[in-house]
Image: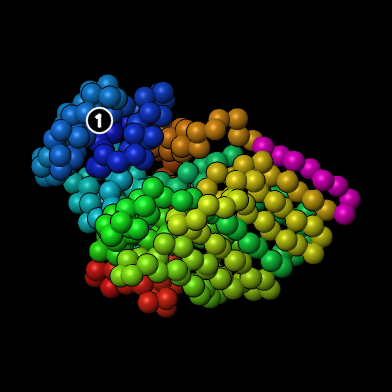
């Protein structure tokens, strides 16, 4: 692939964040925007250097200039939109959570492999340099016995909930909720480091008929347990800690940002940080651009194995907790 000619679906905050980094990267440019609102689509295109604007999905996907589609819409729409893009012969980068159902995620992976297309789960944690450092340092703390993580980020849209409104991020009709949004990062990091847990149980805080606004997910592994707390209705200190028989690893700012990594044993205390850019999405854009330009299908497809495990954990956990989405 000589150049990534990006078509975006969605016009929310995350799209602006990604396109800001796209504008600063080489080998990738914005080619077109799809939005149900022509006004929002035009504003997005103008802000980031032009590009065509579509309000018709079929016309958007038929545009031969677009070779990669980036999807950043409400969670429940990811599967259908990703499938349509793949069937149209486009490579796909999809925001997390990739899908709400494991059967849908597996289907998309099969289509991508059959058509020899890229399918990327857009999780910034996966591309942060400190993830490699954590994996490298794990052996220093011995056998893992306990893992705990907290990701609390008060959402301005929770204020709307308190006023009686139902924003998409908390609407089960759009597969919203804290587990699928904030606590997702804790689940992802656990699976990336330790694989799929043997069992998981979710204890959600629910507000009326809405999806979970916060909660704690317990994951059982062979020999240890992991506690993952996430909240969109509170403030808190974000962190991720891995405790072993010979020491511990403390990750500042938690699973979403992977700030500096402190490794403490009886013999030593070391601090590592391979990230000098506070914009964590810059690492994602640079890494994904490189993978696609170099046509590194093996690495991309390996990442899908982790994604499939994450989707299975999320689906099983929420259903056991009584959280269901359309199509379940």
The picture places residue 233, in percent across and down from the top left corner, at: 45, 57
- Lateral position of residue 68 relative to residue 253, left or right: left
Question: How many labels, in total?
Answer: 1
Region in magenta = 266-273
- Residue 272 is a magenta residue: yes
Quarter assignment of residue 168: bottom left
The picture places residue 83, in percent across and down from the top left corner, at: 24, 54
- Give 239 or 101, whichever is nearer the viewer: 239
Quarter assignment of residue 98: bottom left
The picture places residue 256, in percent across and down from the top left corner, at: 52, 48
- Residue 15 is a magenta residue: no
Q: Which residue is mark 1?
A: 44
The picture places residue 15, in percent across and down from the top left corner, at: 33, 38
Q: Which part of the image, by quadrant, shows the N terminus?
A: top left
Residue shown at 41% from the left, 29% from the top: 21
Residue shown at 79% from the left, 51% from the top: 264
SS under mark 1: helix
- Lateral position of residue 217 relative to residue 250, left or right: left
């Amino acid at each position: 692939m000589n150049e990534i000619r990006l078509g975006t679906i969605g016009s929310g905050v995350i799209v602006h964040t990604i396109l800001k980094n796209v504008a600063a990267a080489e080998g990738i440019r914005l080619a077109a925007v799809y939005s149900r609102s022509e006004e929002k689509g035009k504003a997005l295109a103008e802000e980031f250097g032009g590009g065509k604007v579509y309000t018709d999905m079929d016309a958007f996907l038929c545009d031969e200039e677009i070779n990669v589609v980036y999807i950043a819409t409400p969670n429940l729409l990811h599967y259908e939109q990703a499938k349509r893009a793949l069937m149209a012969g486009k490579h796909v980068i999809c925001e997390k959570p990739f899908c709400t159902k494991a059967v849908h995620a597996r289907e998309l992976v099969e289509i991508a492999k059959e058509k020899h297309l890229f399918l990327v789960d857009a999780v910034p944690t996966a591309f942060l340099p400190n993830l490699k450092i954590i994996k490298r340092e794990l052996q220093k703390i011995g056998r893992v016995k306990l893992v705990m993580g907290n990701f609390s980020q008060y959402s301005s849209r929770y204020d709307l909930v308190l006023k009686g409104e139902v924003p998409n991020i908390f609407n089960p009709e759009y597969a919203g909720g804290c587990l699928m949004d904030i606590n997702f990062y804790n689940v992802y990091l656990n699976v990336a480091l330790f694989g799929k847990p043997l069992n998981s149980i979710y204890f959600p805080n629910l507000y009326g008929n809405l999806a979970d606004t916060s909660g704690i997910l317990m994951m059982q592994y062979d020999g240890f347990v992991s506690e993952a707390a996430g909240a969109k209705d509170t403030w808190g200190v974000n962190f991720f800690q891995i405790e072993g028989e010979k020491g511990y690893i403390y990750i500042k700012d938690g699973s979403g940002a992977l700030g500096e990594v402190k490794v403490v044993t009886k013999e030593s205390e070391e601090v590592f940080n391979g990230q000098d850019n506070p914009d964590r999405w810059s690492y994602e854009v640079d890494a994904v651009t490189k993978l696609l330009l170099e046509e590194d299908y093996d690495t991309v497809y390996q990442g899908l194995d982790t994604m499939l495990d994450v989707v299975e954990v999320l689906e099983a956990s929420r259903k056991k907790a009584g959280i269901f989405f359309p199509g379940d």
